[in-house]
Amino acid sequence: MKHLTNKRILLGVTGGIAAYKSAELVRRLQDQGASVRVVMTQAATEFITPLTMQALSGYPVHLNILDTETESVMGHIELARWADLILIAPASADFIARYNGGLGNDLLTTVCLAAECQIAIAPAMNQAMWSNNQTQANIRAIETSNVLLFGPESGLQACGEIGQGRLLDVDSLVQKVSQFFPSTILAGKKVLITAGPTREAIDPVRYISNHSSGKQGYAIAEAAVEAGAEVILISGPTNLTPPERIQTIDIISADDMLAAVLAELDGCDVFIGVAAVADFKPVAVAEQKIKKNSDQTVQSMRIELKENPDIIASVAKTQPRPFTVGFAAETENLTQYAKTKLKKKNLDMIIANNVADKAIGFNSENNATTIIWPTGEKVLPQMSKRNIASKIIQTIAEKLAAKTSPSDTNR
Ligand SMILES: Cc1cc2nc3c(=O)[nH]c(=O)nc-3n(C[C@H](O)[C@H](O)[C@H](O)COP(=O)(O)O)c2cc1C
């Protein structure tokens, strides 16, 4: 697994003689698995062509703030949101001054203003420009504003002078970017996740289902991808947008879900069954819409149900089997039911979820759970589903490592 797999880097290129090195930088970041999009200042295009950067990055290069066409495709706010890290390399003295002044007078500075992710700046300029008092004051100011400063280094400069101000070499820049993303706890692992409800047809227009929104399962899929895993999400019908960087397979019924899970299980290291799979389905599905009975004295009808396949138990029975994690959504005796399920289904871990409380559980933004494994448990108090997800992924990674490492006796 490459160190920057699934990471999204927005590379800002400004108008300096070192701009040609940004072409190599794109390639080297991609070699580490990153997706790279490029924003260039007007001056940068005088040093290296947007066509070169487009051909290397595989994406259109973003140049202008006041361009209706590009704004409608991927505007400055979307670009800022897309990035996990914004790296400006090379960063000119002028850009640094504009950034420090809080200006948004071109696309790159505006994207930086709109960004909530980390920004890293790799300055490159003549040694006198670098030592200039104004430049140094700007550098000191941005350093205290949580911006990462990569370089510059000292050496022979393009102008023939020797001194501080050279762009850090491409290897070191890639290394610094990699150090910023330390979370590779699931690097090289394939993780299969189910999410959302299933629908069990009664007739062509009606079905039995439940209130699962899919939010917790989707959040876990995103946390797994952020931890470096290759993630496949098998999702029942939800209103959620399929997450980027995740292969999502849409299914309707429990039978569909089981078939999709078994088809994807090969080579899978972790299986997390978050979906609220319907326990029962109608014995027979009516071919036509069931009509109201014309005899008004009959006011009830019966739908005979049979058990659905148990997806998580089927996964736990396979050999070799992945590290298998289940969810127990209960309305009473939460941990007791969850522990029984863990044992009965031979799972590696179970997440006990109280769905009786409206503030957490189904459809809400928050959750509170207990992670239970055969030799211990961890209580996660109420927090966002995203935070719950990253803590679950962290615990899974720890237990998975302990299971695969023979020297570890933590199980
Ligand atoms: C040949 C040439 C080389 C330049 N090299 C640099 C440089 O290495 N670093 C720098 O900060 N400015 C350099 N400049 C000046 C910038 O191009 C200029 O300040 C420009 O306004 C930067 O715009 P930008 O920050 O929007 O890209 C150079 C200018 C020229 C003409």
Image (cartoon, rainbow, N blue to C red):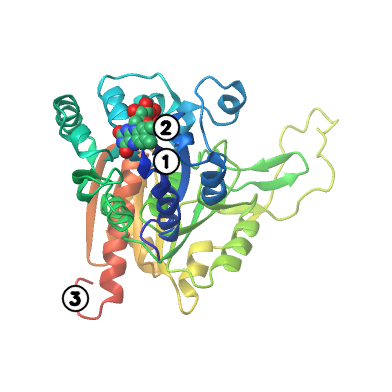
State the residue position of label 2.
Answer: 80
State the residue position of label 1.
Answer: 10
Determine the residue positioned at 80% across, 48% down.
286
Q: Amino acid at mark 1?
A: Leu
Is 279 placed above or below 298 here? below
Crowdedness near tag 2: few (<14), some (14–19) or many (≥20) residues, C-alpha within 10 Å: many
Front-most of 136 and 410?
136
| Residue 116 visible in the displayed image | no
Q: Quadrant of the C terminus?
A: bottom left
Looking at marks 3 and 2 on the same chain, the residue that comes earlier in the sequence is marked by 2
Front-most of 263 and 113?
113
Front-most of 344 and 232?
232
Relative placement, left or right, of 246 versus 208 is left
Residue 279: image x %, image y %?
55, 54
Query: For the residue labelled by badge 1, is the local secondary structure a helix, a strand or a loop?
Result: strand
Give the CA distance from mark 1 to mark 3: 43 Å
Residue 9: image x %, image y %?
41, 45
Viewer-side label of 2, 1: 1
| Residue 66 visible in the displayed image | yes
Q: Amino acid at mark 2?
A: Ala
Viewer-side label of 1, 3: 1
Quarter holding ligand 1: top left
Determine the residue positioned at 26% across, 24% down.
97
